[in-house]
Amino acid sequence: MTKTNNRTLYIVHAAIIAAFYVVLTYIAAGFDLASGAIQVRFSECLTILPYFTNAAVPGVTLGCLIANIVTGSAMPDVIFGTLATLLGAVGSYFFRNNRLLVSIPPVVANALIIPFVLKYAYGIEGSLVFFALTVGAGEIITCVIFGQLLISVLNPVRGKIFGTDSEAVRKKK
């Protein structure tokens, strides 16, 4: 595959991941699960995708940014929520060779950053520790439980979805 084709494939993968992130956030928002002190944002399970492709890092970051804007999030949430997702995805990329550890960075990033957003951007009453626990619990559900299920589903078809050049395929050879 040529360098141009690889770059195009990378952009397409990132764009598709971003679109999935936005759609999944809308679904969670429809059930009032995408924001607040207790949140289960289904789209966050996509932060494990660096296990398969590094295109997931800009993909989930852009998806989070767009989702936060179109769902009417406060500006600090748009900025710091997107930053939390970026840091989680980058952390997942660094742990891409360990199936279990790839799920942990998004949990930690969101549990550390989002409580401040909830308290100071939205003025939700409660302690930062409480928010860290509730946000962390939601992230465990989405990133660890759903994320590991997503890895199990995608592993058998990773070469077809992410291409034969995906890091996961190369490391398995």
Image (tube, grey):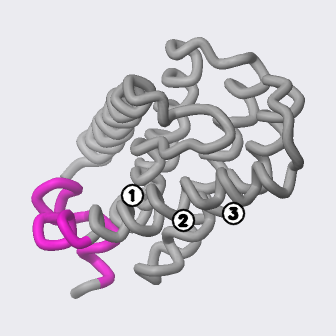
Q: What residue type is labelled 3?
A: Val
Residue 71: image location, x then y, percent:
52, 16
**Mark 2 in CB contact with mark 1 (< 8 angstroms):** yes
Q: Which residue is drawn at 37% across and 58% down?
A: 53
Q: In this view, does 152 lie to the left or right of 84?
A: left
Q: Say if the magenta span includes residue 162.
A: yes
Q: Is residue 76 above or below residue 127?
A: above
Q: Which of marks 3 and 1 is nearer the N terminus?
A: 1
Label 3: which residue? 108
What range of the chain is rendered magenta? 152-171
Q: What element carries label 2?
A: helix
Label 1: which residue? 49
Q: Is residue 65 left or right of residue 134?
A: left
Q: Distance between the residues labelled 2 and 3?
A: 11 Å
Residue 161: image location, x then y, percent:
16, 54
Q: How far apart are marks 2 and 1 (CA)?
A: 8 Å
Q: In which quarter of the image is residue 10?
A: top left
Q: Which amino acid does label 1 sit on?
A: Leu
Q: Which amino acid does label 2 sit on?
A: Ser
Q: Say if the magenta span includes residue 28.
A: no
Residue 117: image location, x then y, percent:
80, 34
Q: Which of marks 2 and 1 is nearer the N terminus?
A: 1
Q: Specify the label residue 92 is tagged with.
A: 2
Q: Give neighbour class at mark 2: few <14, some 14-19, many 20+ (Cα, 10 Å).
A: many
Q: Which residue is drawn at 51% across and 49% down?
A: 57
